[in-house]
Each structure stands twice: as C-alpha cells, then as structure tokens.
Image: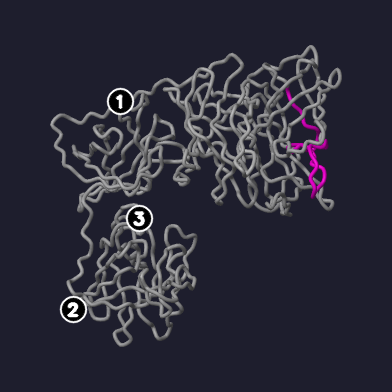
C-alpha cells in the first residue's frame, strides 16, 4: 500500500459522552504471556495482577450533557441495538513500586457489534451479542435495570463464550472489582460507566486478552449496511444487510459507523462539501492476531490491485462506495474481498456535509521578476496509485525575504505559494497554502504529517541555487488529510549538481572494504563488507560505489603525504527519491563538519578513515542518509584482514563472486547475493 509511511497514520475523531470520571479504583492488568492457538494463528495472553487506574472520561458517542431518561416499562428497552466500543489499553507510568497505570486508546480504537435486548422480568433484560471478540455466544448477559433512576447493573463473572483451550470467557469489570454499571440516557442509549474485558482462568491464574478492554455504549439502530460478502475461497458471495449505528460529529462532519461489515469495525468517513467521502485506511482497523497484526481497510480495483483509501459518494441519507474493499495487513495478508457497500440512515436524519472551504490566493507583487527552474520528483501518486517520475517548470521570484513559487501544485500549476527565507538563509518556510478550487473542492498544498497538513521547510542552497524538500509534499482536498495527489518522499527544484568527473581512460581495480555502517533505515550499526572501484590519476584518488544508496557514485580525493583528503560537500549522486546526496566528514575534536581524511598505507596499499564518512542530503551537515564510522578500511589491512564478503544490505541485490569481488548480473556461476550463496545461470 503506497501510503503506509503516510497513511496508516492519519486523524482520529474524539467524541464525547455522558459519564463522569471515576475515582481511582482497583484494576486488573496483564504482565506475562501464555499462548493460544486458534485457526492456525497464535494469540498472546497476559496474566493479570491488581493495580490501580482511573476510569476513562468522555469516551462514548452521546453528548456528555445528555440527561438520564427514566423508563416507565422495561419493554421500552426491547429491540435491536448496536454496541459501540471505544477500545482501551493499559499504559504503565513509572517503574517498580512507583509504577502507576492508566487507560489509553488501543491500536484498534473502535469496534461495534449487533446486539438484541429482550426483557426477562419487570426490571431485568437479556443482552445478546455484547462481545465483539467471540462468535460463539453461549448465553445472553443479564442486566438489572432501575427504571426510576435510569441505571443498569451487569453482574461481573457472567459467561460470554466458551473456548476450546481455556474454557469459559468471563465478562469482568476492568476499572473496579465490583459489578459493571451504567446509565440510560435520552434517545435510548445504555452508557457503561466502567471498562469491561474478556477474562479466562488458566491453571489457576486470571488472564485477559490484550487490547480487549471495552468502554461501551449500546445504541439504538439508526442505519443499515448492504454489501456482498465473500463466503469461501471459491469466490462465492452472499448479499448481506445488517444493522449499524451512525454517529456524525457536529463540528467536523466526519461520520463514524459502528458494526461496519462482519469484521466488527468502527469505520470513520471523512465527508467533503461536494458530497464525496473517503474511508481512510488508517481509521478503520481490525486485529488479525499476533501473526498478521493490524488489518487496514483498502480499496480493491477491478483488476484486484489495492489502493490506500476507499472513496465514495453520498446523498442526504446514504454513503455508497465507488469500489470493492478488503482488509490488508502489512505482514503480507489480506482478507476476502468485499463488494461495494451502501450505508443508509433510517432514523429520519440527513447527513450534513461540511461547507465549501475558501481561502486567499497568493498574489505576487506587481513587476515581480522570476526565473525558471526545473522541478523533479522521483514518484508522484494520484488516486490510481504510483505514476512514476514527474518533471515540470517552476517560476521563482524573490522580494527581500519573501520567495514566490509558481508551478509546485501539479493540479493547479498557475497557482502561487509564498515562503519566507529564515535568518540563516538556508531554509524557506512555506505555510499550508490555498491554491484554488478543483472538482468543486478547495485545494491546498503543504507537507504531510500525522495530524494533517503542515508547513513545508525547503532547504535552500544559495551557492547551487537549489531548493529541496526530503519528505512527502501533499496536494490536499481541502484542509484535511486526503489528497488529490502527492510527491512521495520529496521534490527537488533547480539544476542538479555535476557529478564528479572521472578522467578519460582512468584505470581502476576492485578493492575490498570493511567498516561499521548504518543507514537511516537501520535500527543500529553493523559491520559491512563489500568492494569498491579505485583508481589513481597522479595524486588524485577516485573511489566508486562506497555508498550503495547512490548508484555508481564517485568521490574524489587528493593525496598529501600519507593523507588522502576528500573535500566536503562533494555531490555523490541522486538518491532513489531523486534528491541529491553529498559527502561530508566530522571532526570530533573541532566538533564540526569537515573534509573526509583517510590515512594511506602505501606499502600495503590500504586506506583507513580518520573520521566518520557521511552521505547526507544537506551540505555541511551530519544528518546522514548513511555513514561509516571512523576506522573504515579500503583495501586489505594485514593486521585486520577482510573477512568473507557480506551483502551490503539485505535486499540490495548487489552480487559478489566467491573472491569477494563485485560482479554484474551477467556473471555466471556461484555468487553471493544478499548474504546467500546462489547460482547465476
């Protein structure tokens, strides 16, 4: 999925509800982890011990000022409902005896399930379907209702389901040792005061399921969902119509649908002023067990390809998806494809759509003198996915510290944005900018962040007269997080530096290297071995392919006695996102960026780095894309030697022969690739 770095990170909507904060009470939390295997998947359980936490505040779906609703007859509670769960987890604060615990949102934030309520006496009801985590309900849960006070009580310890391995699944109070209590409020909502969970007893110890703490509201059905569900691997579908509860945030107009599909999801829809919506892949998730991890909602095209968000169109009473959809796990799994859906409100209330956004267009000053610059982007995305490289022309004009750009917005290339050059004259700050209207929606350009649009901080190189941004640039539909298109992992404005010129006819040899290496994608440094091409031209030394993140990049040094000095800020080449990469060193004594210096042992023909050797996107910077620590050896140091060559990086695809020499794809015979011996035929 193209936007996991972006998307799988987006906004959540926090909604309020009628319940007061509880005093700190006794709570069960998990610590170690036995295993449970079901349908070939291993689940983790954690034993619980007594700790103290506070009950959550305002985690429901009704207004926190909603009034209690006295009930004249228990029959008023009979019928079909949907349980709307805010899923909770436990967070430890502090260590040891000083540790305290608090409830926080779980990774799977929301869930829902169809529920039915049947009166069983003058003040008792049976609630069926309350658990969203088990399919085999063995008995309904009994609740006692105080009609006059409009409260209800569920005795803790009732059986929710039975598991083949662990026996009875018990409903238990998580925020106190007592029973689970709640309040009935206007509109027929049953609001829980306590967090509850699914508990088992195994070999005499109590356990609960990780992330399965529910802060619940039982809500009247106010909508239905219709879709095709794939039943089996043979591709058969069945038509499904099921009850849902629909909540719309009065301020943002975002819609949350509980009991979305048969995966018990709480799906969040972002509505636009033109009556379209996006079901974000990050806002509707399910947990597939310890093997699959989290599942995310994705769109499925007619050809079966996956796209990050599910788009659709709305009316006053419906939300209808444009595509099929499925759940996708980044562990490499995806669940059965589901057909396009229609969600219909049946409560006589219409959906509200946000008002059309407006903004102020940037107008350059009269007589602004501009210069044309090339814009290059390694990969841009639209609603159909990755579209490859993109090139355009950008006009730039400068007035004092104000810098005007025209042509950055791919959809609206005539639009201007304005940035401000900072005091050190190396960064231009561009705020989120309105660029016009597209497809009846306001258009904004800005940087991507987890919380929505943010300012662009362009790195300005005055000497090279270039502007670049290393993260994702978004063209937003309005001021929310869904985009018309975006430039993945950066853009470059200006003429690329000239690569290091290698003399004609330069003779090179392959030499091994070994050093402590780390890239910005590595969790920690590791010993890396490989080969580089090395050639002399008088006192000038040329080295190729020291950094595999830059294809075929050369660096040049000059000999002075037994030292080889490589000037800082050499352009090595382009990174995979088309941004420039430069060479710098770091002088630990001066604590400053410096030239890169190697000590040359002429007798044994090897070089040792006197300092870290850094590949960076920013001139005179130690913010690395990759680096070798001090002590990098090029050649064979008789005292240390060079061990068997390893792959430069897992998945790099670089190939060596058994002598440790880098070879091309056309090489035939036994080779080492990604740390494994293979046969090239």
Relative to residue 570, is residue 13 depicted above or below?
above
How far apart are the two marked residues, 1 and 3, measured between alpha carbons? Answer: 36 Å
Residue at numbered disc 2: 538
For the residue pair 462 and 483, the one nearer the viewer reads as 483
Measured as percent of width and height from the top left, residue 70 is found at 75, 14
Residue depicted at x 51% and y 17%:
316
Q: Residues within 10 Å of mark 3 (few under 14, many from 20)?
A: few
Residue 381 in the figure: left or right of residue 464: right
Residue at numbered disc 1: 360
Residue at numbered disc 3: 576
Label 2 near label 1: C-beta < 8 Å? no
Residue depicted at x 67% and y 30%:
21
Query: Which stretch did the figure color magenta?
Result: 157-183
User: Disc 1 on helix, strand or loop?
Assistant: loop
Q: Residues within 10 Å of mark 2 (few under 14, many from 20)?
A: few
Measured as percent of width and height from the top left, residue 212 is found at 69, 41
Residue 330 is labelled as: none
């Amino acid at each position: 999925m193209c936007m996991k770095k972006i998307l799988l990170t987006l906004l959540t909507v926090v909604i309020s509800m009628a319940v007061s904060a509880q005093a700190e009470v006794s709570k069960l939390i998990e610590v170690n982890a036995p295993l449970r295997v079901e349908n070939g998947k291993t689940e983790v359980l954690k034993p619980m011990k007594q700790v103290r936490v506070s009950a959550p505040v305002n985690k429901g779906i009704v207004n926190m000022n909603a009034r209690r609703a006295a009930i004249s007859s228990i029959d008023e509670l009979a019928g079909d409902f949907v349980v709307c769960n805010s899923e909770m987890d436990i967070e430890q604060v502090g260590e040891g005896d000083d540790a305290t615990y608090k409830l926080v949102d779980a990774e799977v934030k929301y869930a829902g399930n169809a529920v039915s309520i049947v009166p069983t006496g003058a003040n008792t009801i049976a609630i069926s379907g309350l658990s969203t985590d088990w399919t085999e309900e063995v008995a309904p849960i009994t609740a006692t209702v105080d009609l006059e006070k409009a409260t209800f009580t569920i005795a803790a310890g009732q059986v929710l389901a039975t598991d083949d391995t662990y026996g009875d699944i018990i409903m238990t109070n998580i925020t106190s040792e007592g029973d689970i209590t709640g309040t009935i409020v206007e509109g027929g909502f049953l609001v829980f005061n306590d967090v509850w969970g699914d508990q088992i007893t195994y070999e005499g110890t109590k356990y609960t399921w990780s992330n399965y703490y529910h802060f619940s509201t039982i809500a009247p059905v106010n909508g239905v969902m219709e879709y095709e569900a794939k039943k089996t691997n043979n591709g058969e579908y069945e038509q499904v119509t099921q009850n849902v509860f629909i909540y719309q945030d009065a301020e943002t107009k975002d819609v949350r649908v509980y009991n979305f599909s048969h995966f018990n999801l709480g799906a969040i829809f972002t509505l636009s002023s033109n009556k379209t919506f996006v079901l974000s892949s990050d806002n509707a998730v399910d947990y597939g067990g310890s093997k699959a991890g989290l599942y995310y909602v994705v769109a499925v095209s007619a050809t079966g390809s996956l796209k990050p968000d599910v788009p659709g169109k709305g009316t006053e009473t419906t939300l209808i998806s444009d595509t099929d959809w499925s759940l996708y796990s980044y562990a490499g799994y995806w669940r059965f494809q589901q057909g396009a859906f229609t969600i219909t409100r049946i409560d006589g209330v219409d959906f509200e759509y946000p008002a059309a956004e407006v903004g102020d267009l940037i107008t350059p000053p009269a007589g602004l003198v501009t210069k044309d610059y090339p814009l290059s982007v390694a990969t841009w995305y639209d609603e159909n996915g990755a579209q490859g490289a993109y090139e355009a022309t950008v006009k730039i004009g400068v007035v004092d510290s104000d810098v005007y750009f025209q042509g950055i917005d791919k959809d609206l290339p005539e639009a201007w944005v304005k940035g401000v050059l900072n005091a050190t004259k190396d960064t231009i700050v561009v705020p989120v900018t309105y660029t016009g209207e597209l497809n009846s929606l306001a258009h904004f350009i800005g940087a991507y962040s987890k919380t929505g649009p943010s300012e662009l901080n362009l790195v300005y190189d005055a000497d090279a007269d270039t502007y670049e941004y290393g993260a994702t640039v978004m063209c937003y539909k309005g001021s929310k997080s869904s985009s018309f298109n975006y430039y993945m992992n950066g853009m470059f404005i200006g003429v690329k530096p000239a690569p290091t010129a290698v003399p004609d006819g330069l003779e090179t040899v392959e030499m091994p290297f070994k050093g402590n290496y780390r890239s910005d994608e590595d969790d920690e440094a590791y010993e890396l071995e490989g080969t580089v091409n090395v050639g002399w031209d008088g006192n000038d030394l040329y080295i190729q392919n020291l950094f595999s993140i830059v294809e075929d990049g050369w660096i040049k040094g000059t000999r002075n006695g037994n030292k080889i000095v490589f000037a800082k800020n050499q352009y090595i080449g382009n990174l995979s996102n088309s941004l420039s990469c430069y060479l710098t060193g770091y002088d630990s004594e001066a604590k400053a960026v410096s030239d890169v210096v190697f000590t040359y042992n002429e007798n044994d023909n090897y070089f040792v780095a006197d300092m870290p050797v850094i590949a960076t996107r920013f001139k005179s910077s130690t913010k690395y894309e990759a680096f070798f620590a001090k002590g990098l050896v090029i050649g064979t140091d008789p005292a240390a030697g060079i061990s068997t060559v390893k792959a430069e990086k897992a998945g790099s695809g670089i190939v060596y022969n058994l002598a440790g020499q880098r070879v091309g794809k056309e090489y035939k015979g036994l080779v080492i690739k990604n740390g494994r011996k293979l046969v090239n035929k």
